[in-house]
């Protein structure tokens, strides 16, 4: 295993931006290393800035992938609160989406839908089509995990899949195909499920997320 990357000598705000900008590298390489970079950068830059809000969000996202739900909630909630205090509606909207994802991964789809409905409404108010698409995908997926709304969730996933395709959002399209396949299988639609699973497997945009 290669030695851990050393934090560069840089001013704290610049280090925050650097560690946040490397999110895709952390996701494709080493989640633990990314969390270490972000935690160190955050510790040296306590000022209430947009850069800190973004870094908190990224750190929370990495923690979510490592199933560290309590820490992820704390980081994303702090990001949401800071974004709200700075009138950063974009940051607030995306933080709400991430909170929904955390609760979904933690097997609480009802709490997930609460966050995701709010995130969807905020993205719609801002006219953020990608935010609307991603919020709808996760909201629909959460709905398919609630007994009373399984079919509604499947219908919304189809709508989200179309939105992702129109936006050329490969990641969103792949995610929607994957969970639409699970929803189809749960509904007894095996052939349709297989079609959607094949589509998800052919979507390179999902990419690997490696723990560590």
Image (cartoon, grey):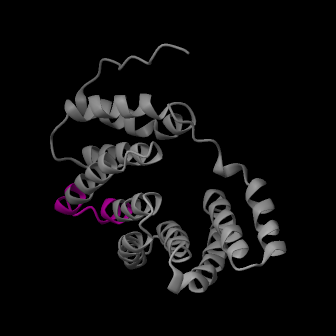
Q: Is residue 14 left or right of residue 116?
A: left
Which residue is found at the position 24% from the left and 29% from the top? Answer: 12
- Magenta span has 191? no
- Magenta span has 86? yes
Which residue is found at the position 52% from the left and 35% from the top? Answer: 211
Q: Which residues are drawn in magenta?
A: 82-94
Q: In this view, does 11 lie above or below 129?
A: above
Residue farthest toward the top in the current orientation of the protein: 3
Q: In this view, does 140 lie above or below 42?
A: below
**Quarter of the image with the N terminus in it:** top right
Residue 136 image offset from top left, x and y in percent: 51, 74
Could one spot residue 176 in this view of the protein? Answer: yes
Q: Is the magenta stretch mostly helix, strand or loop?
A: helix
Could one spot residue 14 in this view of the protein? Answer: no
Residue 78 image offset from top left, x and y in percent: 23, 53
Q: In this view, does 4 lie to the left or right of 167?
A: left
The front one of 58 and 182 is 182
Q: In this view, does 135 lie above or below 4?
A: below
Which residue is found at the position 52% from the left and 66% from the top? Answer: 134
Which residue is found at the position 35% from the left and 29% from the top? Answer: 36
The image quadrant that residue 68 belongs to is: top left
Residue 75 image offset from top left, x and y in percent: 28, 48
């Amino acid at each position: 295993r290669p030695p851990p990357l050393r934090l560069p000598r840089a001013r704290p705000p610049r280090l925050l931006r650097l560690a946040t900008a490397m999110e895709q590298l952390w996701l494709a390489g080493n989640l633990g290393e990314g969390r270490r970079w972000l935690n160190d950068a955050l510790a040296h830059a306590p000022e209430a800035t947009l850069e800190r809000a973004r870094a908190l969000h990224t750190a929370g996202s990495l923690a979510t992938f490592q199933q560290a739900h309590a820490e992820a909630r704390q980081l994303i909630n702090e990001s949401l609160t800071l974004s709200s205090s700075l009138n950063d509606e974009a940051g607030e909207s995306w933080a709400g989406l991430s909170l929904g994802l955390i609760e979904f991964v933690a097997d609480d789809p009802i709490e997930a839908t609460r966050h995701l409905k709010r995130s969807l409404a905020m993205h719609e108010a801002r006219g953020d089509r990608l935010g609307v698409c991603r919020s709808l995908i996760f909201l629909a997926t959460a709905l398919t995990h609630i007994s009373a709304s399984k079919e509604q969730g499947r219908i919304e996933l189809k709508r989200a899949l179309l939105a992702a395709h129109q936006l050329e959002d490969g990641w969103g399209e792949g995610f929607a195909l994957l969970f639409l396949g699970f929803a189809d299988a749960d509904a007894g639609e095996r052939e349709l499920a297989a079609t959607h699973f094949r589509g998800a497997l052919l979507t390179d945009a999902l990419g690997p997320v490696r723990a560590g």
